[in-house]
């Protein structure tokens, strides 16, 4: 029987060892490990056989690593056949909602892993979504509500910076308008890029148009959809 290929992506060696120990007992899994987004993407791009499922920590702490939600976005965009189960010590409604919106196939609190891991893996590989048994109903209900607008992820100041970027203002002009330092503007820009997965400046305007931002639509004389 061909083994199921799984990649454990977590920056805790002890946690990875624990997961590997649970899986190896079953003798039906082929296991790889990654401790950051760069290690995971290197594995996926290496040309070897892709994993069928990724067990992914939502809070990777390695410097420069994307978090689990951002990784899920990228994997689902480039490797849609790969299943993803988000592993987390957090069970907040917002984390669960972000995981669902990013395309995760399952969500499992770390403290429940030993009991539920195999069940979660089998469910997800059979095409089902899996939500941990200890997750409150209200959190699951919230996660499957209509998707939050992207701009709702930003703070009030980040939204102001976002709109000024869309209007074509440079960092020094934004700093003058908001009475903050250029360094602070750069920090806000970095946070906005991270939250909205922005890779180029044109994507600011694209998001504003997709979300029918009235201020920007009027500025560029674009009819609302």
Image (cartoon, rainbow, N blue to C red):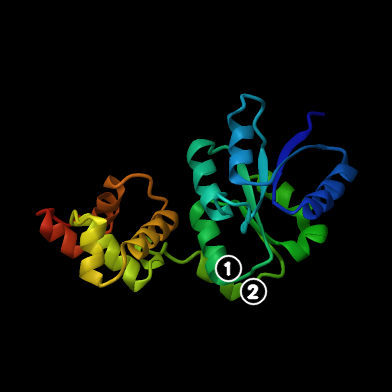
The secondary element bearing badge 2 is classed as loop
Tell me how far mark 1 sits from mark 2, CA to CA: 7 Å
Vertical arrangement, residue 163 with respect to residue 9, above or below: below
Front one among 50 and 106: 50
> Residue 180: x and y, percent?
30, 70
> Where does label 1 land, which residue?
140
Front one among 85 and 186: 186
> Residue 70: x and y, percent?
51, 51
The secondary element bearing badge 1 is classed as helix
The residue sitting at 58% across, 30% down in the picture is: 45
Is residue 212 among what the camera can see? no
Badge 1 local density, few (<14 within 10 Å), some, or many (20+)? Answer: some
> Where does label 2 land, which residue?
136
Q: How many marks?
A: 2
> Residue 125: x and y, percent?
68, 43
Q: Is residue 201 left or right of residue 131?
A: left
**Quadrant location, the N terminus:** top right
């Amino acid at each position: 029987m061909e083994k199921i290929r799984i990649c454990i992506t977590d920056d805790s060696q002890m946690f990875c060892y624990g997961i590997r120990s649970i899986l190896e007992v079953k003798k039906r899994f082929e296991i790889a490990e990654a401790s950051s987004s760069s290690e995971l993407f290197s594995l996926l791009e290496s040309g070897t056989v892709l994993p069928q499922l990724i067990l992914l920590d939502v809070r990777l702490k390695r410097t420069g690593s994307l978090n689990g939600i951002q990784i899920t976005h990228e994997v689902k965009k480039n490797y849609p056949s790969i299943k993803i189960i988000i592993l987390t010590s957090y069970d907040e409604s917002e984390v669960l909602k972000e995981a669902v919106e990013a395309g995760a196939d399952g969500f499992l609190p770390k403290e429940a892993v030993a009991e539920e891991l195999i069940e979660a893996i089998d469910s997800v590989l059979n095409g089902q979504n899996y939500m941990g048994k200890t997750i409150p109903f209200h959190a699951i209900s919230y996660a499957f509500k209509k998707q939050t607008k992207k701009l709702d992820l930003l703070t009030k100041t980040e939204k102001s910076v976002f709109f000024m970027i869309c209007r074509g203002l440079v960092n020094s002009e934004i700093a003058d308008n908001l009475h903050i330092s250029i360094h602070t503007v750069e920090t806000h820009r970095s946070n906005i890029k991270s939250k909205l997965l922005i890779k180029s400046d044109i994507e600011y305007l694209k998001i504003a148009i997709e979300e029918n931002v009235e201020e920007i639509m009027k500025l560029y004389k674009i009819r609302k959809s």
